[in-house]
Image: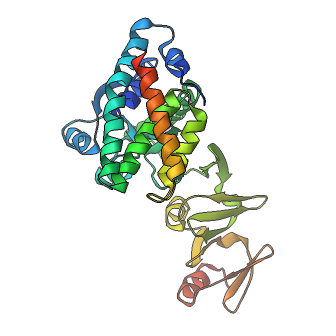
Amino acid sequence: MEEPNIEYILKLSRNEEAIKQRFINILKFELPIEIDAYYMSLRLNKWPQTMTCIHKLKNKIAILGLENSYHLADEYEKSNPNSRKDLQIEFEKTLTLMQHFVNCL
Amino acid sequence: MNCIIIDDEMLARAVIAQMISLHTELNVVEEFSNAIEAIKYLNKNEVDVVFLDIHMPDFNGFDFINTIKNPPKVVLITSDKNFAINAFEYDCIVDYLVKPITEERFEKAMQKLNWRVDTSKKDDTSLNDNMPVEKTNEFYVNINNRLIKIDIPTITIIKAKGDYISIKTDTTSYTVHTTLKKIEEKLPKNLFLKIHRSFIINTKKIIDIEDNSVLIGKDVIPVSRGNKPELMKRLNLL
């Protein structure tokens, strides 16, 4: 499985520590909220809301350089509810991976 | 130029704000996590540019543009290229950026934005100075992110094709994502005529007319019964 990285953030912050830290702080704050929102809407079988959550999380996946996971998430977002358990499993693995990575930053 | 950022993701807003910060001509005056708050703000304040996320819950970017009376220049931000196709329907949209936005792509968008602002200023100046407004003989169409100049007098036929139109000139054909109605507004009325719900023609290019069709180059174009009297009026009949 591919590994997350902060290359995008480093490039964007142009080696300025304060800017880099600001992005990381936002990630640390926003990612768990979005992950919780995803699981909540999924549990309540609210597919449109779930799609919105996946859509938002896709941006974080891309920012953390997870290209393959981004494409899978994109496919998952566009799939019919409950029709692609395989994509759901992969997506949720990505969420765990990202959260773990962000926690360690 | 004062600008606002509308995106429901805090990280996305921070990314855009960071890129904007490298442009001294742009000044972020406010950020919004939803379009409705931004509309309330714009009811009381004027801005020059809006960086607008398309995909937002409840009230998306296009809903926002449709709600604003005189929308400022808009740079769309999206994760989904397919959404951006609709962008060509709106004059206020300068460009669209696909997330995650790269600095290189952002620079291109800023070039387009500055170009559009310069053009608007020139238009304003000529109007303010009461100078005689020179009629433009060309327009630009956006094809695959390239603005291509088309000389209006060289246009022979414009045909509606679903969500697109095909513009045929003396030498080339272009397919553009817009409507026949929109392009009709850009054309000089003395030269062009809608002769069918799917066709606008350059009347100077007509070779012959037979029954309910006209010949332009090698193309035979149908003429609707309702449009034929206007067409006949335009001809210099002996």
- Using the rendered image of the protein, determine whether residue B28 is visible from the camera's viewpoint: yes
Q: Nearer the viewer, residue A15 or A25?
A: A25
Residue A67 to residue A88: above or below: above
Q: Nearer the viewer, residue B208 or B8?
A: B8
The scheme the figure's colours follow is rainbow
Q: Quadrant of the N terminus of chain A?
A: top right
Left or right: B133, with B166 as reference point: left
Q: Residue at x 49, y 33 (%)?
A: A61
Left or right: B12, with B220 as reference point: left
Q: Quadrant of residue A36?
A: top left
Q: Residue farthest to the bottom? A: B211
Q: Nearer the viewer, residue A17 or B137?
A: A17
x and y percent of residue B230 in the render? 55, 82
Residue B159 to residue A42: above or below: below
Q: Quadrant of residue A54?
A: top left
Residue B165 to residue B104: above or below: below
x and y percent of residue A14 in the render? 51, 11
x and y percent of residue A105 in the render? 43, 14
x and y percent of residue A50 in the render? 37, 49
Q: Nearer the viewer, residue B180 or B153?
A: B180
Q: Residue at x 66, y 59 (%)?
A: B175
- Using the rendered image of the protein, determine whether residue B120 is visible from the camera's viewpoint: no
Q: How many marks?
A: 0
Q: Residue at x 37, y 55 (%)?
A: A47
